Amino acid sequence: MTGLTTLSVLTQAPVLAAPAAKLVLRPSYGGAVLEGKIYVPGNDVLTGVWSGAGLSRLMKCVPRCAVVSSIPLKNTLFLSNSSSYRIALGGSYRIGEKISVTLRLRNQSILTTQATVTQP
């Protein structure tokens, strides 16, 4: 009888990039506005954002700003004072303060990040 050789093939599931965010807070009238970018692999929907001050407002600003219940995400969402979508947080903030921000995504669950308060 001859010896048996066993081949084992290791398969590894493809690694998907995790959702991520790099954000800053710019103080504005009555609170602050998030600026930066939010990345999700593929398509998703941002359904809520919270900070220590509570729930924020998701807004679509084309042509005027109006509160919306969600923001569509296709890979990367850029937030700024000139973008179509904005996220406003109530409260008062100090320059240099780090704020924990929690984002709820429809398909990817929860993403927690920090945003530093910067000059207006």
Image (cartoon, helix red, strand yellow):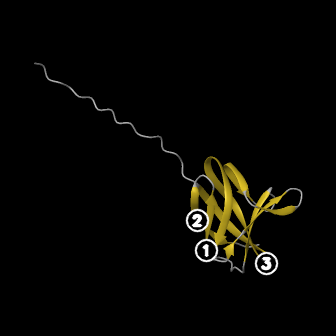
User: Tags 2 and 1 in contact by the CB under 8 Å rule?
Assistant: no
Q: Which mark is residue 43?
A: none
- Mark 2 or mark 3: whose residue is earlier in sequence: 3
Task: Kindly give the residue lying farthest to the right in the view shown.
Answer: 63
* Label 1 residue SS: strand
Q: Position of residue 22 (x, y in %)?
A: 63, 60
Q: Position of residue 23 (x, y in %)?
A: 65, 63
Q: Position of residue 65 (x, y in %)?
A: 85, 62
Question: In the rendered image, which quarter is residue 80 located in?
Answer: bottom right
Q: Which mark is residue 98?
A: 1
> Which residue corresponds to mark 2?
113
Of the residues shown, which amino acid type is indicated by label 1? Answer: Lys
Task: Kindly give the residue lying farthest to the left in the view shown.
Answer: 1
Quadrant for the C terminus, please: bottom right
Discs 2/1, front: 2
Question: In the rendered image, which quarter is residue 3 located in?
Answer: top left
Q: Which mark is residue 30?
A: 3
Q: CA distance from mark 3 to mark 1?
A: 18 Å
* Label 2 residue SS: strand
Of the residues shown, which amino acid type is indicated by label 2? Answer: Thr
Residue at 38% from the left image edge and 36% from the top image edge: 11
Of the residues shown, which amino acid type is indicated by label 3? Answer: Gly
